[in-house]
Image: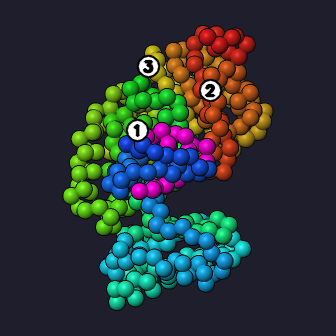
Amino acid sequence: MNFIATATPLTEGVVEKELLELGVKESSIKTGRVEFKTTLENACEIAFKIRTARRILLPLKNFQFDSKEDFFGESKNFEWEEFISPDNTFLVRIKGTNSKLKNTSYTSLLLKDAVVDRIREKKGKRPSISKENPDAVILGYIEENRAQLSLDLGGALHKRGYRSVPTRGTLNETLAAVILKLSGYDGKEFLIDPMAGSGTIGIEAALMSANISPGFLWKMGRGFFSLNLIDEKKKREIVLKAKDEISSPKERIFLSDRDEEAINISRKNAQNAKVLNFIDFSVCDFFNLTPPSKEGLIVTNTPYGEDVSLDEEARFYFKKMGDKLKKEFKNYTASLLLGNKEAIKSIGLRAFKRISLYNGSVEVKLCLYRLYEGSLKEKSQR
Ligand SMILES: C[S@@+](CC[C@H](N)C(=O)[O-])C[C@H]1O[C@@H](n2cnc3c(N)ncnc32)[C@H](O)[C@@H]1O
């Protein structure tokens, strides 16, 4: 069967690699998504386990349409009753517009009515809508004159459910997992995030290190659990297998931030994710931080925007950061998410890898540095 893993643009390659690790044999990369073939059961297991994709979708119908009426008719002409019973609740989400369907709220109303009408005609009773906790989520993608209707197998995977308070500058959970993988983190080295904010990088690292599937953080009845796509025994098997794979984390994780409130939020989030015991926390300005271990991997989302916005301030701040890393964090590898051109220039270290990413709509660079004496730009790379 065909499935789609949606991905933040520029992260498709990382998502495809993880799909292959999770048992997929055939896949192809498109902008913003990876299309793949596997069994329905494996796709549900992937939705439960994958860290880097935003959603795992089961495509149901792909059609061309020339008018609103056409869209409604084609949407209704599908065996929705085989996937959604009158006792289920559901929700429709639409992405994209075209010249015939310019308003996504109106398009979702049309699709919702088509599904309701079809099920009522076939079953004599209609399913109801739930915005908060729907059993089924139907996603409609509109592109030019085509529509792609899919069922969402795991919901918004970038919202794992452990964040207690939304905080400024926070990375979403799937992007944090992508960054860790691109930084070469394999769960076995000592990891530091010295500008941890709400702790997303450290919490994702702890989940990876202990091999805890993100699905364990879902609220009851999310995604495929509330659908009748696979039987209850298979659902239980997915959970039991993932439970068996959980191990103790191989190394500690260290999170610090100069803002006490940020560390309090990190702690709370780590507790929600049930990884509090794997992480050490400290309130400390990075410029006063003594390396907590002889060697390790630093992965951090450096401040930009409101924290460091003026060119001159940024130049000074990032020069100090580069100097500190070079002098005090010898034998570490640093993977820094930098959102400011001045920052990349001013840091004064030679990156052995630079990777473009999007944090929301902001284009950022993930720069990887090996820190050892002589890693300043003017010296040649070892
Ligand atoms: C962009 S946010 C990091 C967000 C984090 N990755 C997350 O997902 O929540 C930057 C963080 O750096 C912290 N920060 C800025 N300068 C710092 C410094 N000199 N030492 C320690 N923390 C600093 C801020 O307090 C803020 O929490």
- Which amino acid, mark 2? Lys
How far apart are the two marked residues, 3 and 1, measured between alpha carbons? 31 Å
- Which of discs 2 and 1 lies nearer the camera? The answer is 1
- Which of discs 2 and 3 lies nearer the camera? The answer is 2
Residue where numbered disc 1 is placed: 21
Q: Is residue 260 visible?
A: no
Q: Is residue 6 magenta?
A: yes
* Quadrant location, ligand no. 1: top right
Q: Which residues are magenta?
A: 1-21
Residue where numbered disc 2 is placed: 353
Q: Is residue 141 magenta?
A: no
- Which amino acid, mark 1? Glu
Residue 152, percent from left and from top: 44, 62
Residue where numbered disc 3 is placed: 293
**Nearest the eye: 261 or 202:** 202
Circle 1 — which element?
helix
Circle 2 — which element?
strand
**Nearest the eye: 306 or 364:** 364
